[in-house]
């Protein structure tokens, strides 16, 4: 199936020319056209295009403004900037705004356009891989601690601004050191990977889960109070213990986790305190025999 390219340009002649040039690519690209700023931005943010060709002049507005707005809203589609000007200042401005390449309209031919598109697509793939390495744990595929804490801070601000609940669950693999000591670190890695997948499958799309430490995981439960967070924690504990982890050598290894949950209470409470309270609840779950979930309310009762 041809990859779809979006052209944002208010000139119909440029659309027909670009369509003709792209028809010479092998394999060919499929071209869609938006002839104004608002429609172009809307389509670009839909995320259905492999790349975007963006004109500098869009009526009374310009493509630099559109790039900044799209990138600021989280757009990851690679953008190639088109302009009739050949000045270095435009080139620099386009790259600083977020474009991955730059073409002067009067110099575009089929070969140059094809090269630019394939370069931008390759560079975008590389940048996405680097972004993932910076934000995700390599072993489990979950968010890493730094990215999780960044997201948690954002959600803390949102919860406080709109008066919405926010909750946290911390989970820890029980007796994980024994797995490494008796089965080896490769088996330990397999256990962590499988536990991570079971936790992730038990969450909603709006929740966020991270590998928080060696064998510890953290879940941010959005729009949830204490009771809902405890229910999530119980469900995740059950999801892990319901069947053993099957290792690559065929061995089936029973694995359990402990969990502690807490809710952010009051406008003055910070996310860092939320984590501390959930951690105390987790400690109580371990002290009570592991393989269970404890809510933060158990702290005051202990």
Image (tube, rainbow, N blue to C red):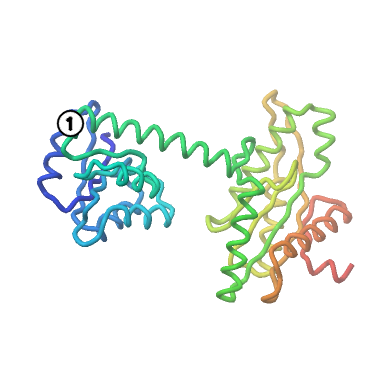
Q: Is residue 24 left or right of residue 187?
A: left
Q: Residue 195: which quarter of the image?
A: top right
- Around disc 1, counting alpha carbons within 10 Å, would you say few (fewer than 14), some (14 to 19), or many (20 or more)? some
Residue 37: image location, x then y, percent: 25, 58
Question: Residue 272's image quarter?
Answer: bottom right
SS assignment at label 1: loop
User: Is residue 91 found left or right of 159 in the rendered image?
Assistant: left
Residue shown at the point (69%, 76%) measured from the top left: 266
Which quadrant is home to the N terminus?
A: top left
Does residue 38 appear left or right of residue 184 in this picture?
Answer: left
Q: Quadrant of residue 31?
A: top left
Q: Nearer the viewer, residue 254 or 116?
A: 116
Residue under label 1: 109
Across and down, in percent, residue 82 comes to 24, 44
Q: Which residue is drawn at the image coordinates 33% and 40% (left, top)?
A: 50
At a point 62% along the width and 42% down the height, the residue shown is 197
**Numbered marks: total:** 1
Rendered location of residue 78, percent (x, y)? 36, 42
Q: Quadrant of the C terminus?
A: bottom right
Frontmost residue, 130 versus 45: 130
Q: Position of residue 123 (x, y in %)?
A: 41, 34
């Amino acid at each position: 199936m041809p990859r779809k390219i979006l052209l944002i340009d208010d000139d119909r002649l440029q659309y027909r020319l670009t369509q003709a040039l792209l028809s010479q690519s092998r394999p060919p690209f499929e071209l869609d056209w938006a002839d104004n700023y608002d429609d172009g931005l809307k389509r670009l943010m839909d995320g259905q295009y492999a790349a975007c060709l963006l004109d500098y002049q869009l009526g009374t507005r310009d493509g630099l403004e559109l790039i900044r707005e799209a990138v600021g809203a989280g757009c990851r589609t690679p953008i190639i900037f088109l302009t009739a000007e050949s000045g270095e200042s435009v080139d620099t401005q386009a790259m600083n705004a977020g474009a991955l390449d730059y073409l002067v309209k009067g110099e575009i031919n089929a070969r140059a356009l094809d090269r630019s598109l394939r370069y931008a697509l390759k560079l975008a793939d590389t940048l996405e891989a680097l972004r993932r390495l910076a934000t995700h744990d390599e072993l489990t595929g979950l968010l890493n601690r730094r990215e999780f804490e960044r997201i948690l801070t954002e959600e803390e601000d949102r919860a406080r601004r709109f008066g919405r609940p926010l909750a946290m669950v911390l989970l820890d693999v029980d007796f994980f050191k024994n797995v490494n000591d008796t089965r080896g670190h490769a088996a330990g890695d397999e256990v962590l990977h499988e536990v991570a997948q079971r936790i992730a499958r038990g969450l909603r799309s709006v929740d966020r889960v991270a590998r928080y430490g060696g064998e510890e995981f953290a879940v941010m439960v959005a729009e949830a109070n204490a009771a809902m967070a405890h229910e999530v924690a119980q469900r995740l504990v059950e999801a892990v213990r319901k069947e053993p982890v099957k290792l690559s050598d065929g061995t089936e290894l029973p694995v359990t986790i402990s969990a502690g949950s807490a809710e952010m209470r009051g406008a003055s409470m910070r996310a860092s305190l939320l984590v501390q309270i959930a951690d105390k609840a987790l400690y109580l779950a371990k002290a009570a025999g592991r393989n269970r979930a404890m809510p933060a309310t158990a702290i005051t009762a202990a």
